[in-house]
Amino acid sequence: MEIKLHANATTTPRTRKYLQESDKSDRELARELGISVTTVRRWRNRSQIADNHTTPHVIHKALRHEQEALINALRDVLRAPLDELLFMVNEGLGIPLSRATLNRYLRPAHEGRKESVLQGKKALKAGVTPDTLALHYRLLALPMDDGGDHHLLWTQEPVSGWCYARLFSGISPALVDHWLDEALTACPVEIQCIETDPVKCFKLERNDVLCKTSEHAEPQAIQTGVPLAELIPALDDPDRTVQRLCQLWNTGRAQKKLGEKTPQAFLEALRQGV
């Protein structure tokens, strides 16, 4: 019969049984078998002679289903590698997860993410210029405790991943134009083209940039029956939380694909010709 022992084991099951049945002192047994007194005492105090299992019998799920969906959506939107995503989950959302636990809950990346444009230094080498903003819209059907329906507007510069987002309780063409002006002002590089989701609030006509509508299907509303405070421990006011997440992503952690720069620093370096 094959016996599997711990890699650092100094005793065998037969030796352990001998220790448990012997009337000799701990020191005598240690000298006889050439092992430490601590090892003798450990096995004399146990009722079994097999190594203890090192893996837990029960793995407790640390995330709610809604939190798992939120984290996977955040990963897909940001195209964040594991370490950068862990930073956003711990520091941004306030969900205390280890790297291994987070990795266990990640679903395979969707096809749209796999086929998206190159980012960072690889994109620059391929001749991709960071001069476009992609504008996105989602209707968030939140519980009444969180104010009911809200409108999420976010924009992203695809090469660096730089983001700018706001969450509003109402929506109008004037509000969208004002928000876009804020995004263009905040973006570290000059934007020449804007690509929007096919929704009514993005019927834009501007003289300063080219506006076009993407060919993607119209985005569907996102519904949650769980209060945001139960999903996001670090929740402040919802709009301030969205802004804080963007700031954290843009300036909080350097990324390897960006030459060990944050998205903000990456674009600023390009603007300055560094």
Image: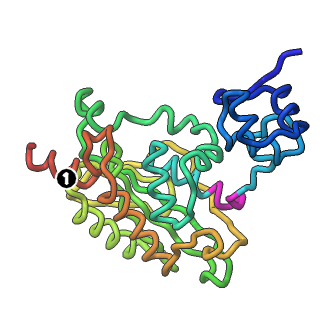
Q: State left or right for residue 230 relative to residue 191.
A: right
Query: On the rendered structure, is 244 left or right of 2?
Result: left
Name the residue nearer the viewer: 230 or 173. 230
What is the number of callouts on the image? Answer: 1
Q: Position of residue 39 (x, y in %)?
A: 70, 40
Residue 26 colored magenta? no
Instruction: Locate the N terminus by quadrant.
Output: top right
Left or right of 37? Residue 80 is left
Residue drawn at (72%, 58%) of the image? 65
Q: How crowded is mark 1: few (under 14 residues within 10 Å), some or many (20 or more)?
A: some
Which color scheme does this rendered protein use?
Answer: rainbow
Snapshot quadrant of residue 30: top right
**Residue 165 percent across, percent down from the top left:** 40, 65
Q: Return the x and y of residue 161 as percentages of the image width and height.
A: 35, 48
Residue 139, horizontal then vertical, whole percent: 58, 66
Q: Which residue is drawn at 23% across and 33% down?
A: 124
Residue projecting furthest to the top: 1
**Callout 1: SS:** loop
Vertical side of 213 occupied by 240: above or below: below
The C terminus - image quarter: top left
- Which of 167 and 197 lies nearest the eye of the viewer? 167
Residue range highlighted in magenta: 62-69
* Type of amino acid at the residue the image marks with label 1: Val
Q: Quadrant of residue 185?
A: bottom left
Which residue shows up at 61% across the image and 81% down it? Answer: 146
Task: Report the residue marked by disc 1.
Answer: 189
Task: State left or right for residue 34 relative to residue 121.
Answer: right
